[in-house]
Image (tube, rainbow, N blue to C red):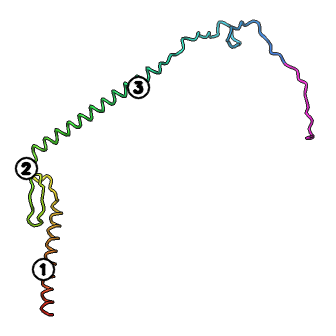
Amino acid sequence: MDFGATPKTFATGAVQATVRTDISVQNGATPVELPPEKTVRSVPAGEPVQLDIRARAEERRSDAQRQQSAQDDTAQQRRFDEQRRQQELRDVIERRLDIDPKTRSVILRKTNRDTGEVVEQLPDETLLKLRTWSREILERSREAKASRSHEIERLA
């Protein structure tokens, strides 16, 4: 198969680099054009670096344990502070269960013994008012139905 182009070979001569004999080259050195007294001599290589992977892993483990114990200590201190604060609140707060006559529901009131202020109430005042109004509306609707049924009976 012919592609139309014939390979051409060219004759070339090899050019030899000039070798200088005035510079003594040491083994492994790069030749430069400086006099030997102005060149920098390389320092022999030192000992190779030894890495102890097990020691690093052990160090990481001990760091993690120290960090975990520090976190545990702070968490324990927080729990202790919270328990102490709750105990102080228990000493100051009085709990009472009452029954509201209007709604007939049980009310838990937590009051401050020192000031007499209501700290917490379950159910809330708003909910008690809603229950009272709901009860009143139901009673009024029952009364209205009862009076209507009597009127119907009278008319019939």
Tag 3 near tag 1, CB within 8 Å: no
Q: CA distance from mark 3 to mark 1?
A: 80 Å
Report the magenta residues as a range.
Answer: 1-14
Residue for badge 2: 115
Is disc 1 placed on a helix, strand or loop?
A: helix
Counting from the top left corner in percent of width and height, residue 75 is at: 27, 35
Query: Mark 1 — residue?
Result: 143
Q: Is residue 142 magenta?
A: no
Q: Are marks 2 and 1 in contact (CB under 8 Å)?
A: no
**Nearer the camera: disc 2 or disc 1:** 1
For disc 2, the neighbor class at 10 Å (few under 14, some 14 to 19, many from 20) is few
- Residue type at mark 2 is Thr
Camera-side residue: 151 or 63? 151
Query: In what quadrant of the picture does the N terminus appear?
Result: top right
Q: Is residue 72 above or below residue 62?
A: below
Q: Which residue, given by chain and number where applicable, does mark 3 sit on?
A: 60
Tell me what residue is drawn at x 43 percent, y 20 percent.
55
**Secondary structure mostly taken by the magenta-highlighted segment of the chain:** loop
Which class describes the residues within 10 Å of circle 3: few (<14), some (14-19), or many (20+)? Answer: few
Residue at 13% x, 41% y is 88
Q: Where is residue 67, by image quadrant?
A: top left
Q: Amino acid at mark 1?
A: Glu
Task: Answer with mark 3 or mark 1, whichever residue precedes in sequence.
Answer: 3
Q: Residue furthest bottom?
A: 156
Residue 120 x/y as whole percent: 15, 53
